[in-house]
Amino acid sequence: MQAQHFETPSQAQQALSALAHPWRYHQVQAYELIDHKRYAKQGRPMADTPIKAIEWQMQAQVRLDAERIKDAKQHQACFVLGTNIETEQLSDTEVIAGYKAQSQAEGGFRFLKDPLFFVSSLFVT
């Protein structure tokens, strides 16, 4: 955004707010408007050289929104795992470890779904 020039400061602020609106985990910490004067004549301007136009440039500093990141991590860290095992038989950590271990066993049978294996043609009658 710092490479863009705007006609008015309000246009620069609108562009910054439009850019920052979809951000979920960042916030604008500070911004600065810089004016660039365009003179009527080329070359180094003298004291009496008339100003043709003023363009505005925006420089902004962005920071992470630590509170939103923390909330998102906490929200994504939760899941529901239902079982019919009594709490006296297994602890919560043992149930989670058993659940995660299923993916290792299921990964070993992945080849059955492969179309090159032709499992459907191997029926025993």
Image (cartoon, rainbow, N blue to C red):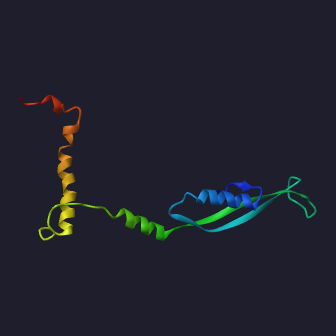
Q: Is residue 83 left or right of residue 37?
A: left
Q: Is residue 54 left or right of residue 14?
A: right
Q: Position of residue 29 (x, y in %)?
A: 60, 69
Identified at 65% across, 60% down, the residue is: 16
Q: Is residue 96 above or below residue 119?
A: below
Q: Position of residue 37 (x, y in %)?
A: 81, 59
Q: Position of residue 84 (x, y in %)?
A: 16, 61
Q: Is residue 109 left or right of residue 36?
A: left
Q: Is residue 97 above or below residue 125?
A: below
Figure quadrant of the C terminus: top left
Figure quadrant of the N terminus: bottom right
Identified at 38% across, 64% down, the residue is: 75
Residue 111 in which image quadrant:
top left
* Residue farthest toward the right in the current orientation of the protein: 48
Identified at 33% across, 64% down, the residue is: 78
Residue 14 in which image quadrant:
bottom right
Q: Is residue 102 above or below residue 67?
A: above
Q: Is residue 108 above or below residue 93?
A: above
Residue 109 in which image quadrant:
top left
